[in-house]
Amino acid sequence: MALRVEHDIFVVRQRGREVAAAVGLEHQDQVRLATALSEVARDLLRVVGGADVTFAVDLEAYGPSQVRVDLAPMRPLPDGRYEPHSGAVARLVDMLGVVHREGDTVVRMSRRVPANAQALTLERLAELRTELGNSAPGSALDELALQNEQLVSALDEVRSQRDELAVLNEELQETNRGVMALYNQLTEELEETNRGVVALYAELDEKSAQLGTASESKSRFLANVSHELRAPVTAIIGLSRLLADSASDPLTDEQAQQVGLIRSSATDLLGLVNELLDLAKAESGRLEPNWTEVDLRAVFGQLRGTMRALSTKPDVELVVEDPPPPGTVRCDEVLLAQVLRNLLHNGLKFTDRGEIRLWAEIRDERWWLSVSDTGAGIAPELHERIFEEFYQVPGSTRIGGTGLGLPYSRRVVRLLGGTLELTSEPGRGSTFTVTLPARGA
Ligand code: ADP
């Protein structure tokens, strides 16, 4: 088509819309393409005195086809460039710009044909070309009327979009109000919970202070009572030994047996009193470790000697391994030996067959000193209970003891900066492990 005079703008616009409709662009897009075309046509008429307008379709093997309009200007474009008068024009089509075509410079615009449009084939294009060729271009007035109609429907659409927007806005505000209400409610609940938690903490602090005082009084009481008991019990043991002495007046068999009972009961009692005193001392913080560089090999050697003497069961073997180098730990020798003796003693007490083994390892900068046995083992739910004062596993009480050895040992180990833990399964023996920092607490 030739674009030479003002009237041609209408015709080009009309043709643009017809071509757009023919290839299957939606109504909105037809108007967009026609509007962009008439704007560009107006610009080119003004600036370069008109153009030759070509409508074309680019068929794509893959992806959507494009409807394309090339406007070859009558005179060269100033600086070879084209900027639409109104910037909004470029947004009406997918592409608008200057391209070079076989030595010519043309202004080109294109728009994608929607995927749901009737498929464009060469035959179909020939058909469309004939149809469009047959339809006579309408008058400028017709085009104006149509343009007005399109304007009205565009305005309608804008209005309905604005109404929709208003509804959406209203809904958004409603949602916002809901969210704010929820937020306020949550904030209130959170504050309420916080107040509760603060009150609970205050109560806990108070309770733990009370517990601390109670535990202190208990330790003081135990220390005093056991201290007071030690002297008379020691006296009873001494006196019963005197009574049974061969240098004293002879006793009847009956009397000798009863004196023997008194002595063994008093000895048990002294054991208990001593353990209580130890525990009370450890709990009250009056036990102060004597920190020295302790030679573990010497400690183990001593335990090997003294504990062998206590191991009287024929089917039980006591094995004390040599600790690996460097073999020293900063610690209190007497307290450490006491703890290990306690654990070995328990092992011997609660094992009828197999072995009791003491060994040492260094791992993660700590000493791991373990005492394992092949005894009855301890059920998992009792692993912590046996560290409670006076607790003895039901059934094990007949073997004797006070239930104070483990709680005391754990306190002492903690005082030395370490831990005392147990791994055990019923029927598979037990392993008590003391860990100590290799370089001291
Ligand atoms: P005691 O040995 O004087 O009873 P402890 O505090 O040393 O007190 O031990 C508490 C209880 O833990 C023991 O009575 C026993 O029931 C259980 N126990 C401790 N060591 C072992 C062990 N090696 N094997 C099985 N049970 C054990």
Image (tube, grey):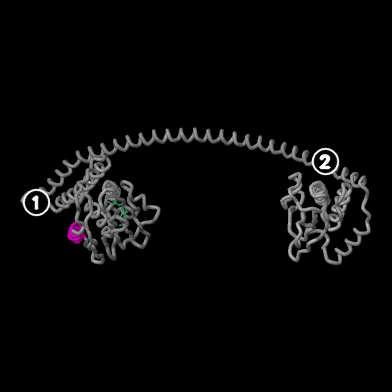
Q: Is residue 219 above or below residue 369?
A: above
Q: Which residues are magenta?
A: 298-310
Q: Is residue 40 something one can see in this rendering?
A: no
Please give the name of the residue rendered at 24% of the width and 42% of the height, measured from the top-left corner: 281
**Left or right of 167 in this view: 275:** left
Amino acid of disc 1:
Asp
**Left or right of 438 in this view: 125:** right
* Residue 420 position in % (x across, y down): 31, 52
Q: Which residue is mark 1?
A: 245
In this rendered view, identify the residue nearer to me: 205 or 273.
Answer: 205
Please give the name of the residue rendered at 83% of the width and 55% of the height, measured from the top-left corner: 53
Q: Is mark 2 within 8 Å of ligand 1?
A: no
* Residue 335 position in % (x across, y down): 22, 49
In this rendered view, identify the residue nearer to me: 11 or 57.
Answer: 11
**Left or right of 115 in this view: 189:** left
Numbered mark located on residue 155 in the image? 2
**Left or right of 415 in this view: 100:** right
Numbered mark located on residue 377 in the image? none
Q: Is residue 124 magenta?
A: no
In this rendered view, identify the residue nearer to me: 281 or 114.
Answer: 114
Q: Main secondary structure of the magenta part?
A: helix
Which one is closest to the eye, mark 1 or mark 2?
2
Amino acid of disc 2:
Leu
Q: Is mark 1 within 8 Å of ligand 1?
A: no
Q: Is residue 303 magenta?
A: yes
* Residue 413 position in % (x across, y down): 28, 49
Quarter holding the N terminus is bottom right
Say which element carries label 1.
loop
Q: Is residue 219 something one can see in this rendering?
A: yes
